Image: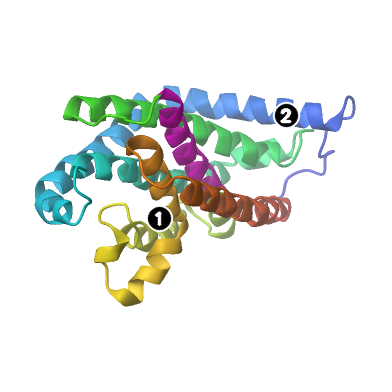
Amino acid sequence: MTAPSLPAKPLEGPATRLAVRDAWTVTKRNLRHFLRQPRLLVFSTIQPVMFVVLFSAVFGGVAGAALPEGIEYLDFLLPGIFVQSAAFRSTQTAVGLAEDLERGVIDRFRSMPMARYAVLAGRTFADLTRNLAVLLLMTAVGYLLGFRFTQGFLAAVGALAVVGLFGFVLSWIFTYVALAVPGAEAAQTAGFVAVFPLVFASSIFVPVETMPSWLQGFAANSPVTVAADAARALSIGGPTLRPVLLTLAWAGAILAIAVPASVRRYRRID
C-alpha cells in the first residue's frame, strides 16, 4: 500500500530536536507493546538460562579442560551466553518490524508528518531497552548459579554495555532485513540463517584454539568472538583492550553501513 504524500518532517522547530521527539514517541509505543506481553521477557530469559545449564552439564567437562587453570566453565560461558542471547534477540527486530509492515502500522507512520528514520530508531532503541532488561535478569540468574563478576562494578557495567551495544548494532542489520525480505516468518528465517553460523563459529562456547585450523582465523576475528571476549575480559579478567577496541570498530563499521542502508530502504517502501 502506498502512503499518502504528506510532509516527511514537522514544519516547525529544529529538525534534530523534533526527530528525537518522534523517535522517543515510537520507542515508547514499542515499549508499551513489550509490557503488554511480559511472556516475551520471561521466555527471552529462560532460553539463555537453559543454554547455560545444558552446556555447563554437557560440555563443561570437555570444554573446561581447555580453559586456563583457575577458570570455571560457568564463568567462561555466561558472558558468551550474554552475547549469544543478544544476537538471537536482535532477530526479533526484523520480526517486529515485518509485523508492523504487514499490519499497515508503518504506512500509518509514513502518512504522518514525522522524521522518516524515527520509526527505525524507535524500533531499535526499544529493542535495546528490552535487551538490557533481559541482561539484568540473566545476570541475576547467573549469580544464583554461582557466576560472579570479578573485575569490579565499573567493569561489570562495561561488560553489559558491550553486550548491549553488540545487540543494538545487530538490530540495525535486521532492520534492513525486515525492509528487504517481505513477511515476518521470512525475515525471522533470514535472520536466524545469518546469526546461527556466527554464533557457533565463535568463542562463546569454547576457546577458538580448540577449533580446526581452517576455522580459527574466521572465528577469532568475527564480531561475535570479539564481543564475547570483551564481555568475558570485563567480567572475569584477561586481555581487555584488543577485544574492546575491535568490538567498537565492528560496531562503528556495521552502523555506518546498516543505518543509511535501512533508512534508504525505508524511504523506498511502496
Q: Are marks 2 and 1 in contact (CB under 8 Å)?
A: no
Pointer 1 local density, CA inside 10 Å: few below 14, some 14–19, many at least 20? many
Residue 141 visible in the snapshot: yes
- Sequence-wise, which precedes: disc 2 or disc 1? 2
Residue 96 visible in the snapshot: no
194 in relation to 61, above or below: below
Residue at image point 67% right, 53% down: 256
Residue at image point 43% right, 45% down: 230
Residue 195, located in which quarter of the rendered image?
bottom left
Label 2 sits on residue:
20
Residue at image point 43% right, 22% down: 35
How many numbered circles does the render carry?
A: 2
Pointer 2 local density, CA inside 10 Å: few below 14, some 14–19, many at least 20? some
Q: Residue 245: x and y, percent?
A: 55, 49
51 in relation to 28, above or below: below
**Residue type for callout 1:** Thr
Disc number lying in front (2 or 1): 1
124 in relation to 142, above or below: below
Residue lying farthest to the front in this orientation? 69
Instruction: Tell me the CA gap for discs 2 and 1.
Output: 33 Å
Local SS, label 1: helix
Label 1 sits on residue:
225
Q: Residue 59: x and y, percent?
A: 14, 53
Q: Residue 268: x and y, percent?
A: 72, 56
Highlighted range, magenta: 153-172
Residue at image point 53% right, 29% down: 30
Whether the magenta-drawn stretch holds residue 162 is answered as yes
Relative horizontal placement of residue 29, taking residue 49 as reference (left or right): right
Whether the magenta-drawn stretch holds residue 133 is answered as no
Local SS, label 2: helix
Relative horizontal placement of residue 246, taking residue 229 as reference (left or right): right
